[in-house]
Amino acid sequence: MALVLNDEQRMVKDSADGFFAEHAPVAQLRKLRDSNSADGFDRALWAKMADMGFTGVAIPESHGGTGLGMVAAGLIQEAIGRNLSLSPFLSSAIVAATAITRGGSPEQKAALLPQMAAASRIVALAADERPRHAPAHVETRAEASGNGFRLTGAKRFVLDGHVADRLIVSARTSGEAGDTDGITLFLVDPNAAGVSIERRRMVDSRNVAAITFDDVQVDGADMLGAPGEGHAILEAALDAGRACLAAEMLGVSAQSFDSTVDYLRSREQFGRKIGSFQALQHRAAHLFCEVELARSATLKALTALDEGSDRAAFYVSLAKAKAGDVAKLATNEAVQMHGGIGMTDEFDIGFYMKRARAAGETFGDSAFHGDRMARMMRY
Amino acid sequence: MDEELEGFRRDTAAWLEANCPAAMRQPVESERDVCWGGRKARFSSDDQRLWLERMADRGWTVPEWPKIYGGGGLSRDEHKILQQEMRRLGCRPPLSSFGIWMLGPALLKYGNEAQKLDHLPKIARGEIRWCQGYSEPGAGSDLASLRTSAILQADGCFLVNGEKVWTSYADKADWIFCLVRTDPAAAKHLGISFLLFDMASPGVSTSPIRLISGYSPFCQTFFDNVRVPQENLVGAPGKGWDIAKYLLTHEREMIGGMDMASAGRDSMHQLAKTAIGTDSEGRLNDSLLRADIARHEMNALAFALTLERVKDEARAGQGVGALSSMLKYYGTELNKERQELLMSFAGSDSLMWEGPDSHDGDMAKSWLRSRANSIEGGTSEVQLNIIAKRVLQLPGA
C-alpha cells in the first residue's frame, strides 16, 4: 500500500482536525486540570466523539464500530496530540477494543464492543507491574478455583483505570515472571470484592490507576482468549496502542514545531526577528526533517497494522521509538526557543513537553523499542 | 489495473532471470564494479557490457523516460516493480551516469526537441559520459558568484574562458554541462546560462585533484578560448540559474538516495555480528555499539520510508516542496554516521592502508570519501538554509 492517505482517510483527518481544535483545545485540558476534575476528562466530549464515529474506529462494523482501521485511528490520535485533548480514546477505544476484537469470545464481543463503540462503557488494560514497561513481567497470579480463578497481585500505570467500567488484567496461570507463555487475560469488574483502585495524577494531567487484586474471584467465562496464551493478544493490543501513541506524539511534535516557527517569525530581539538568526534557523530546519521522518515511520506502522503484515510489530517499534525521540526533541527545542515564556505555566508549550515525556514512556520508550527492533533483527 | 501490474511483475521477473548474467547479481564491491559508460568506457567484464546492452535495448537504463529518447516508457508503478524485482534478484544497476541522474531530467524539462533527440538516447545507451561544470575556486557554497565567461562571437559561437573545480570524473567524461556567465553586466543570478560542450574541444584541459582518501575522482577543469556552437545553449540566455537549481534538486535527491540505498540495507548489523560477536542470547557483545547501531538503523529506516512517502505523495499530487534539501541533508549525514560505525566494527583493521588484508585501504578510503557527502552538491548548512527559507519561511538576515 502506498504511503499516502486515501480519500476516506483524508476525510477522517479533516473531520478529526476540525473536531478536536473546536471541542477539545488545550484550554480544555487547562480547565480540567485547574478544576481538579473527578473524571479527568469531559464526558460530553467523549459522547460527541462517539457521535463522530471516532470511538468505533478500531471496532468492526459487525460489532457497532466503523471498522475504519488503524491509519484512521492514527489520524484521530494525531489530532488529539495537536490539541492535547483528554479522553479514554487510547485506553478504551484502541487498546482494550483491540484486545477484545482479537481475543474475545463471540459472547464477550457482543457484550462489550457495541457499548465501547458507543462510548457508554470504558474498558482499561491493567498490564504493567514495573515502572519500566515490561509486559511479560507478570507476577500477578491466577489460581484455578471452582469454575473460575482467584487473582492476586498489583498493577500500576493503568491508563484511565479510575474511570473504567471493566478491566482487562494480565495474570500468570503458569511459568515465571518474564515468560511469555503462561500469561492469561481476564475481564474483571472493578467493583468486585478484593479490587482496590487508587487514582494517580501525572505530570501531563492524565490519570492512571494503581490497582491491587486481593484474592479476587473471576468467572471462567471472563477469561479473554485461551489460558496461558494471553501474551499474543496483549502484544496486539499494545502494538495498536503504541502505533497510536506514535501518531499522538507526531501531533505533539508538529504542533510544538508550528508554534515555535510562528514564534521565530514574530519575536524580536537585538532589533530583528529571532528567526533571522542562523543558529536558530538550522535547528528549526533540522527539526523539520525529524518530524518528517517520524511521520513516515508512523504512517508505515499504521499501514502495516491495517494490512496485517508480519512486519507490523517491527514497524510499530520503529514508529514508537522514532516518534518518541522526535517528540522529546521537538518539545524541548520548543521550550528553549520560546525562552523564558516557555517556562511559564500560562503559556501552552510546557503542556506539550509534559505530554511528550509521558507518551514516550507509555508502552515502552525508545530504548525499549530500539531493543525490540534489534532482537527482531537478531542482533 | 492491479492485475496488469502483476502481469508486468511476472514478465519482468522472468526477463531479468533470463537476461541478467550471474556475475551481475553479485553485490557491488568496488568502483570497478560500477559501469559508467562513455567513449572511453572500460568494461570490467563481458558480462558488464552485455548487461548494459540488454538493459539499454529495453530502455531500462532510464525506465521512465519516453521511448523516443531511448527510455522504457514505464509508469512510476511499473518502474517501482522493476526496481523491486532487480533488488530481489540482486541485479546491479546496468549504468551509473550523471547524464541519467542530473542532465537528463533537466534536458527533458528545459531542452529543445533537437537537443533531446541528440543527447538523451546517447545517455540512455551509455555512449556519452557527462560531467558537471558548476563549482569554481571562488564559487563554492556561493555558486551564483561563478565567473567562467561565455561571450557570443560574430560567427555564432560562444567563446568560453575560466576554471571549474570539483568536476567529478572530468578526465573520464566526454561532454560537460556547464554554468557560464553570458552577461557580466546582469545581476549575479541573472547573467548565468547553461551550456553543453564536448570535452575534446580545443582549449579544454583537466587536472585531477588528490583527496584525503588518496582517490582523485575530482578535477580542476580549465577553459582557454573554447569555441562552443550557439545551439548548445539550453534554455534562454541568462536563464541558466533556474536550470541549475532544478538540476541540483535531482543531484541532491541522487546523493541522498544513494546513501539511503546503502544506509537502508540491513546488512550493517550482520557485519557487526561477524566482527564483534554475540552473547548467548544472540545480542552483540558490545552493548554501547549495539545501541548506536540500533539508533542508526532506526533513523536509516525512517529515512528510507520518507523517501518512499515523498515519492508516493508526489505521485498523488500531495506533499510539500523543497524536500530535496531535506533528503540531501539527512541522507548524507546518515551515510557519514554509517561509515563511522563500520570503521568502529572493524577496530584497528579499519585503519590498514596497504599490505595483506588491507584491501587497498578500501574501508578507510570509503570513510574518508563519505566526508565529502555533506559538502558536495551544496553543504549540509546550505541545505538547512534552504529549508529555513523556502519551507519554514523564516525571515532573512
Image (cartoon, rainbow, N blue to C red):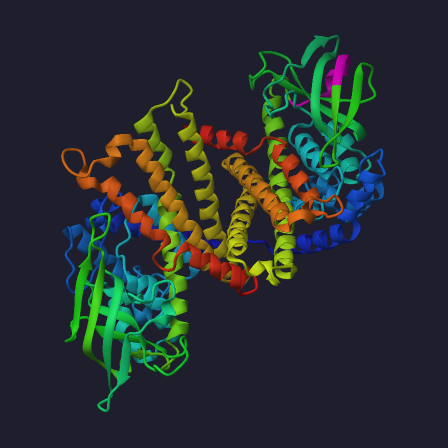
Residue in the image at 69% along x and 56% along y: A14
| Residue B347, percent from left and from top | 29, 31
Q: Quadrant of residue A158?
A: top right
Residue B15 as seen in the image, left or right of residue A149: left
Considering depth in this image, is A281 or B256 the residue closer to the camera? A281
Residue A23 as seen in the image, left or right of residue B149: right
Residue in the image at 67% along x and 47% along y: A340
Vertical comparison of A361 with A292: above or below: above
Residue in the image at 66% along x and 30% along y: A99
Vertical comparison of A91 with B334: above or below: above
| Residue B159, percent from left and from top | 23, 82
As for residue A223 lying within the magenta part, the answer is: yes
Query: Which of the image's four quarters has the C terminus of chain A?
Result: top left
As for residue A267 lying within the magenta part, the answer is: no
Tell me where the magenta segment starts and ends, as one range.
A212-225
Considering depth in this image, is A21 or B165 the residue closer to the camera? B165
Vertical comparison of A262 with B305: above or below: below
Tally the marks. Answer: 0
| Residue B308, percent from left and from top | 47, 52
Instruction: Please say whether residue B131 is visible from this viewpoint.
Output: no
Residue in the image at 62% along x and 43% along y: A249
Q: Main secondary structure of the magenta part?
A: strand
- Outermost residue on the front side: it is A270
Residue A248 as seen in the image, left or right of residue A195: left
| Residue A120, percent from left and from top | 82, 37
Vertical comparison of A362 with B234: above or below: above
Instruction: Please say whether residue A90 is visible from this viewpoint.
Output: yes
- Outermost residue on the bottom side: it is B154
Q: Quadrant of residue B139?
A: bottom left
